[in-house]
Amino acid sequence: MYIPKHFEETDPSILKGLMRQFSFALLVTARKGEPIGTHIPMYVSDNVHDDRLLGHLARANSHWRDFDGRKQAMAVFQGPHSYVSPNWYLSGGLPPTWNYATVHAYGRPRVLEDVEEIISVLSKLTRHNETDLTGNWEIGKLSESNLTAQLRRIVVFEMLIERLEGKFKMSQNRKAADAQGAANGLRTTRNSNADSVALEIENRLQGR
């Protein structure tokens, strides 16, 4: 990923924070020179010595056959993003642009075979994403026969995170007044993505 120095983010807690908040990612590998991508939710697992991405995909999706623990993959996590109008800057003569935050995670996914590991991964994914506060759903609510049938239809994997790249393009290359103007303008759009970008711009302005 092309990352100018002023847009580079290297803090692991910030990078993993985005990955957890925007956990529906694009996992990409290459097969005989052709890219293959699958959109799936993934869970960031913090371990004592390493961090891993956990996920699953349909067994009918042949992408999992590349998950042999040797082939490299890239998971793309897209955070908030929005168009920025030149009308919002105090300075004149500036072009429009697009502000965004994204993280690329690299590793070598491998298929999990142990049933206990598989159920543990599925439980983590469910707990992380379940939003029905009236009664959080759990894997244990499936009958044994139903669970067995469901497991036949999916492939569960883990990917040790070997490298993270983070790019937070949030008007750091503009004067503070212009960056604040962009934040103010973004809020007038009444768009949740734009609001998130505005907040991120202001957070980074405080660190200048």
Image (cartoon, grey):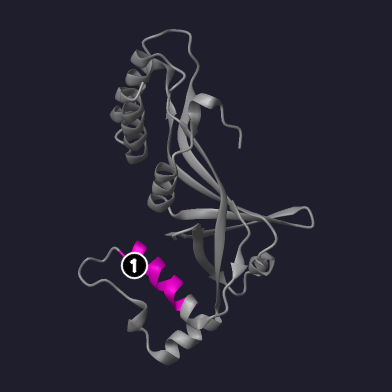
Magenta stretch? 118-130
Give the left or right position of residue 31, taking residue 50 as reference.
right
- Quarter of the image that includes the N terminus: top right
- For mark 1, what is the residue? 127
Query: Residue 171 occupies which quadrant of the picture?
Result: top left
Above/below status of 46 relative to 12:
below
Is 161 a magenta residue? no
Question: What secondary structure is found at the residue carrying circle 1?
Answer: helix
Above/below status of 57 relative to 20:
below
Query: Residue 3 occupies which quadrant of the picture?
Result: top right
Q: Which residue lies furthest to the left in this view?
A: 134
- Mark 1 packing: few (<14 Cα in 10 Å), some, or many (20+)? few
Q: Nearer the viewer, residue 160 or 104?
A: 160
Q: Position of residue 113 (x, y in %)?
A: 57, 79
Q: Which amino acid does label 1 sit on?
A: Arg
Q: Which residue is pictured at 48% across the width and 13% down the height?
A: 94
Q: Which of 31 and 110 is in front in this view?
A: 110
